[in-house]
Image: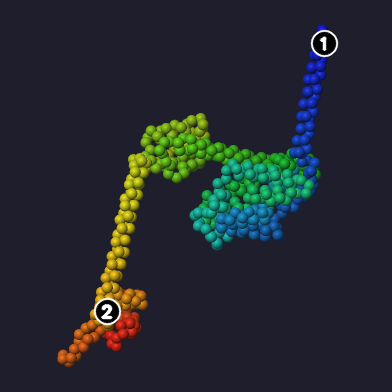
Amino acid sequence: MEEDIKKEVEKKSYAEIDAKSETVRIIEILKSFLISLFDFKDDTDHKATIEAIKADIPFKGATAWILIFAVFVASIGLNADSTAVVIGAMLISPLMGPILGLGMSFALNDINTFKKSLTHLGIMIGLSLFASFMFFYFFPLTSTTEGTSELLGRVSPDIRDVLIAFFGGLALMVARTKKGTIASVIFGVAIATALMPPLCTAGFGLASGNFSFFFGAMYLFIINTIFIALASFIVLKLLKFPMHKYANSVTRKRYATIATVVGLAVMIPAIFTFISVFNESQTKIQFSRFIENEVKKIPKFQLLGDPDFDYKKKEIRMSFFNEVTDDVKYVLKNQLNDEEYNRLKDFDLKIKGSDTKSFELITTAYQEKREELQQSKNIIDGLHKQIADLQETISKLNARIEQDALNRNEKAVAFSRIAKDAKIRYIDIEEIGFASMLSSKDFIKIDTIPVATIKWNVKLHDSIISPKERELRTWLQKELELDTLFIKRDK
């Protein structure tokens, strides 16, 4: 019996050992798969990478002209608010070379490459600012105080710009170190990090005197530059690129110290920049949540526009369509002290309410005015119909009068038709009359003389009226079938 129990225990032990062995084997297989999937050290060409980066650092000849053309293309795209044109400028810009050179010089302790990269990058930045300044100064295609959406998108960097620059720089350096550089990755990073548009936006700020644009755009450019260089530094360190060799240990240590100090000087602002932008981004997230959860859910309250969030001044400004009581203001200010909005507790909440008593009152007044307007519209439509009916009646009466006159006298005049035609031909006529006047020259014999009385526009000069009257007399004689006609001018 004991032997059977012992055998059973041994079987279970062997089964457990086999299960553990299988688990270990699966983990080892998975580990090997992940290493082979993500390991790119074997696909790295150290020498070719260093040579390629150094070759892109110099700024002269064709590179200088390419930079200037890229500046003009980007400036036109920013003014025209054309994303496609701005992307084209990103692709042809040669700014990436010196930035990668900075990151590589820190990683390899190459002080000469650092000096060269920093010098050429400084020249590129200066030339880009000058060229964009000149373009916007002489060709201000947009307002000098407001910019297009493409310009405005480069003056307020946030945490996303930091992340784009950092991960874009990582992708770029991995592509650069691979045997047979992946051109599509390089183009993609050039578009994502967008080095040229911020410099052109800064030039716009200088040309228009808008220094908030200038400093905001330069801030974005500095973020991109620092984090791309930092990403290249990290990749080269991970890949264990060989350090630069110097003639003696003293020189090597001195340059290593200089590189370390400069590297820290660059990385420390980058870290503070990241923290600052991250904190601002998190504060904006809490602000948005506060507006959605606390402000917009107040019953029967309506915001006027979007609330104003000023991170630097620590102010939140809101305007309501309703009258805001002190109790409501007190409740909202207390909610800022909740743990959920801990980043907003130091902010000053400024609330402005409407002078109206209530939203319902305004709504009721609005509805009443709409009803009054509709009634007025109905009355006006009725009056228009009455006027049209009266005009039709007058036309019929005129026609009957003229027809009766024709029936009594074949030589009677269809005056309404002739009056309309005269007004069409001579728009400066203000009034016209026609009659047969009795006249006697010897005071014995009496003649009947047709007379047309014309009142012209008072603004017309006599030199213009006289030829018009001669033309009118000729036309009236033909229409009235008269041998003679006297034109009388009514003042």
The reply to whether residue 455 is in sight is: no
Q: Determine the residue positioned at 62% across, 39% down.
A: 271
When the figure is inspected, residue 124 is found, relative to residue 27, above or below; the finding is: below
Res. 77 mark: none
Q: Residues within 10 Å of mark 2 (few under 14, many from 20)?
A: some
- Of the pair 175 and 459, the residue shown nearer to us: 459
Q: Is residue 420 left or right of residue 214?
A: left
Amino acid type, callout 1: Asp
First in sequence: mark 2 vs mark 1: 1
Which residue is depicted at the point 77% across and 41% down?
40
Q: Residue furthest front?
A: 407
Circle 2 SS class: helix
Label disc, if present, on residue 4 of the rendered structure:
1
Q: Position of residue 455 (x, y in %)?
A: 28, 77
The answer to which of 86 and 382 lies nearer the viewer is: 382
Q: Is residue 37 above or below residue 475?
A: above
- Residue under pointer 2: 406
Depicted 197 relative to depicted 298: above or below: below
Residue 231 location (% of width, % of height): 68, 42
- The residue drawn where x is 78% and y is 47% is 179
Mark 1 neighbour density, 10 Å: few (under 14) some (14–19) many (20 or more): few
Q: Quadrant of residue 487?
A: bottom left
